[in-house]
């Protein structure tokens, strides 16, 4: 299971040991090929941030501060380089792509195409934003439990 840029981490791990992976859930997978440059991705994050609840920034800021600008910049550069769609080619695992209805960072087109191109399932989470699991832990837990038996 990976959320946002964490979906890339999950996809990389799955691609390195495909025989060991039975199911892969990518939640709000990032980065849409249409925004695969640092300026475009930062623009999407800023625009998407306006859709998120304001408390999220306050909750995440201490982690970003502790990580430092160099590490945050490294994550952004990595996010632009890692192409989830290329990592899933050898995966025979069940793929589930979870997309929030009001995701301002990951486009519906990209999430749908990712699922379709790799024989996966697409689940749309109604009335949710990119970072919905942070604000809706019960629905997140229910979704994971329901989809990954």
Image (cartoon, rainbow, N blue to C red):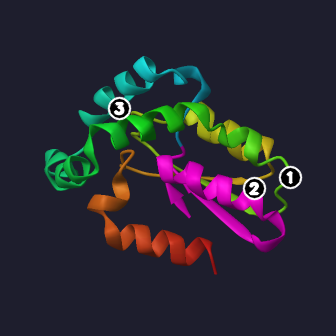
SS for callout 1: loop
Residue 86 is situated, as x and y percent measured from the top left of the image, at: 75, 39
Q: Which residue is mark 2?
A: 15
Q: CA distance from mark 1 to mark 2?
A: 7 Å
Residue tagged 3: 45
In the image, what residue occupies the spot 48% across and 32% down? Answer: 77
> As rendered, which of 138 and 30 lies closer to the eye?
30
Q: Is residue 61 above or below residue 17?
A: above
Residue 78 image point, x, y percent:
52, 38
**Label 2 packing within 10 angstroms: few (<14), some (14-19), many (20+):** many
Spatial separation of the CA atoms under disc 3 and disc 2: 26 Å
Residue topped by disc 1: 90
Q: Earlier in the sequence, mark 1 or mark 3?
A: 3
Badges 1 and 2: C-beta atoms under 8 Å apart? yes
- Which residue occupies the foreground of this view, 119 or 65? 65
Residue 51 makes an appearance in the image: no
As drawn, the residue found furthest toward the front would be: 70
Give how far apart the Cα atoms at labels 1 and 3 are.
30 Å
Q: How dense is the environment of label 1, judged by Cα within 10 Å: few (below 14), some, or many (20 and up)?
A: some
**Quadrant housing the N terminus:** bottom right
Q: Is residue 14 magenta?
A: yes
Residue stretch in magenta = 1-29
Residue 53 pos. (x, y %): 20, 47
Q: Residue at x 78, y 73 (%)?
A: 20
Q: In the image shown, does 69 or 33 lie closer to the viewer?
A: 69
Quadrant for residue 137, please give it: bottom left
Return the disc, 1 or 2, that comes first in the chain's sequence: 2
3 and 2 marks in contact (CB < 8 Å): no
From the viewer's perspective, tell me whether residue 93 is left or right of residue 81. right
Q: First in sequence, mark 3 or 2: give its number.
A: 2
User: Mark 3 packing: few (<14 Cα in 10 Å), some, or many (20+)?
Assistant: some
Q: Is residue 19 visible?
A: yes
């Amino acid at each position: 299971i990976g959320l946002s840029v964490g979906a890339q981490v999950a996809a990389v791990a799955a691609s390195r040991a495909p025989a060991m992976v039975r199911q892969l859930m990518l939640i709000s997978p990032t980065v849409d090929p249409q925004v695969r440059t640092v300026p475009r991705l930062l623009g999407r994050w800023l625009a998407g941030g306006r859709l998120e609840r304001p408390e999220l920034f306050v909750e995440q800021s201490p982690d970003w501060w502790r990580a430092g600008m160099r590490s945050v910049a490294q994550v952004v550069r990595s996010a632009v380089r890692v192409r989830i769609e290329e990592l899933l080619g050898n995966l025979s695992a069940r793929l589930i792509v979870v997309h929030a209805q009001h995701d301002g960072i990951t486009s519906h087109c990209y999430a749908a195409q990712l699922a379709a191109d790799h024989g996966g399932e697409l689940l749309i989470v109604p009335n949710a934003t990119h970072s919905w699991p942070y604000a809706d832990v019960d629905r997140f837990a229910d979704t994971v439990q329901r989809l990954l038996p």
